[in-house]
Image: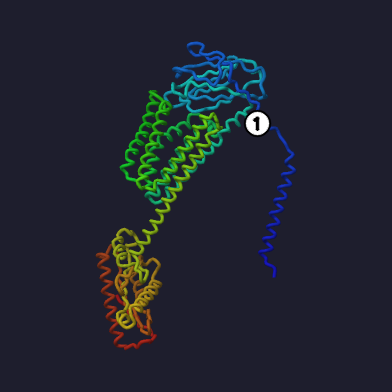
Amino acid sequence: MIDGRRIDSRIELVLVLLVAVVLLVSLAIDSSLETAPLREGNQVVLDSGWSITGEQGLLAADQDLPYHIEGEVGGKLFHISRTLPDSFPNTNVSLSLETSMSTLEVLLDGKSLYAFTGDATLWKDPVLGGGFTHFVRLPDWAPGHEITLVMGFTSNNSFSGRVAAPILGTKSDQLLLQLRELPSLAFGLIFLCTGIICVCTSLGLRKGSEQNSLWYFGWLELALGAWVFTQNCAKLIIIRNPVLPMNLSLVALFILPYVLTQYIRASYMILDRKLRPFLYISEVFLIAFIAGGVAQFLGLFEYVDMLLVAGMALALFIIALFIVLLIDHRRGNRDLFSFLLAVGVLFITVIAEELLLVMSIVLENAVVLHIGMSLCGAILLSHTARVISQGEKSKIREQMLLELAYTDSLTGLGNRTAYEKWIVSVPDRGKRSRVMGVLLFDVNDLKPINDRFGHAAGDQLLRVVSRRITGLLPESAETFRIGGDEFVTFVPHVTEEQLAVLCDTILEQVFTIRGCRHTVACGYALFLNEKSDSLAAVIAEADAAMYVCKATMKGAAGDQQLTPGEESAQSPITVS
């Protein structure tokens, strides 16, 4: 007989091979097609022959760019001029220029081609921070004519006064040149997405160290992502606003100490007094961010004036925190190893970046640093996952202990402790507790079977009784074993007639163990929240009814003189 599954697998293999053949043939056919390249590669850097004029006159002649204008430049205009080449390397040429903390107007023979002022900002003064690349389309008659860059710096900080060398070429070439920083943009977006996912996921966890650890890790990733995303010009592919991303990088710098400290508090076992000074310092960073915003609105100073001091303070903060935790680790707190490893990896990558600069090795982007950040984040996320896992295991153990504490080990029903807790919680059950039936039932003649056959036989009888009777009750009923052979059941939303039927059904049950027949005595009462004195009084009423029933059943059994092994059922007894 031929196996159908084997035939199907062979057919699937043939289909996959045919798909591969068709793909290879189509690639071979299409490989001969060719089109013009997106990047022509004929860019010209205008880095020489510039004259720089300020409000006080000529500052530099025949100057090479990049150039940094010394002195007070805030609020002043500077003209940077030279003659364009007599011919351009391509048609449809654009001029690209990166500025920082500056407005820009491009003039060709005194005629304005492009203007960027940023006057719409809501801040006291225009703050055109960060690197922003301008693209200016040059007309066909531009070769050989004078071009002038009019730059108006908005600040006196170290980011102002810089004049970069413009580049001539097609706009596609210039855009692709900006994409050299695309890996940095990708890293920034990955950090941001990871942070958003972790912050949102933490909201679904129970409150405690697990939630806090994931919450603050998410904010760490958001802070790193905001900084990386906004510190490269490739971001302009997504957003053409040069100012808005600066707000993200600034807030990332100032909240990083706070979220880092809170992450350590939530994720590691460390004395709070050791972290308290760092928490206070991190709050100073938050206050500094608020004060910086107020000062910038009032025109006193700008955020960028704080960057150098804030950056150095952040570095010292992390180093001090690292040292304190390293000492604690050396004293036996092995739990801190993952954090020290993460920060150590970050330090190593920062040092590697600096060494590359010293060795004059310039990478297109800070890929080494970003890889270090990624490894640092992966290590911390691994520790957070361990914190969450341990928390879940602890939660499971806690639930198991609660179940053991409130469950009768013999029958699996609620025990006396669970019964007492349930009674206390009745007032909080709202509509469910307004009308409730109470059933008490007791196994008749359990002691004789224990004496004659041992407690194992008696335990078997109790298990059979609890299983069969709970099967007769509604799913909404709550049943507890409150004594050796005594059980109580609470049935919500029931009438007195329905309780009577349930009680009769229980009374009709006969349990044969070791050839001896056993029955169950039952009593009931109805609890009406608005009419009954108390639930305890209703339970006592049902208990009394059950004992009346038990006495009646014993009398009837004495009259009948039943012999062991007889299978006829007892006559139902109704207790009101």
Query: Image point 29% across, 83% down: which residue?
Result: 554
Mark 1 burial class by Cα count in 10 Å: few <14, some 14-19, many 20+: some
From the viewer's perspective, tell me whether residue 18 is left or right of residue 84: right
Instruction: Give x and y (percent) for residue 81.
Output: 57, 15
Establish if 126 lies above or below 333. Answer: above
The quarter holding residue 417 reads bottom left
Q: Nearer the viewer, residue 238 or 182?
A: 182
Color encoding of the figure? rainbow
Q: Nearer the viewer, residue 509 or 340?
A: 340
Q: Secondary structure at mark 1?
A: loop
Q: Is residue 537 visible?
A: yes
The quarter holding residue 404 reads bottom left
Instruction: Give x and y (percent) for residue 216.
Output: 41, 43
Q: Quadrant of the N terminus?
A: bottom right
Q: Residue furthest top?
A: 57
From the viewer's perspective, tell me whether residue 86 is left or right of residue 276: right
Query: Image point 48% across, 25% down: which residue?
Result: 128
Q: Nearer the viewer, residue 374 or 195?
A: 374
Residue type at mark 1?
Arg
* Residue at numbered disc 1: 39
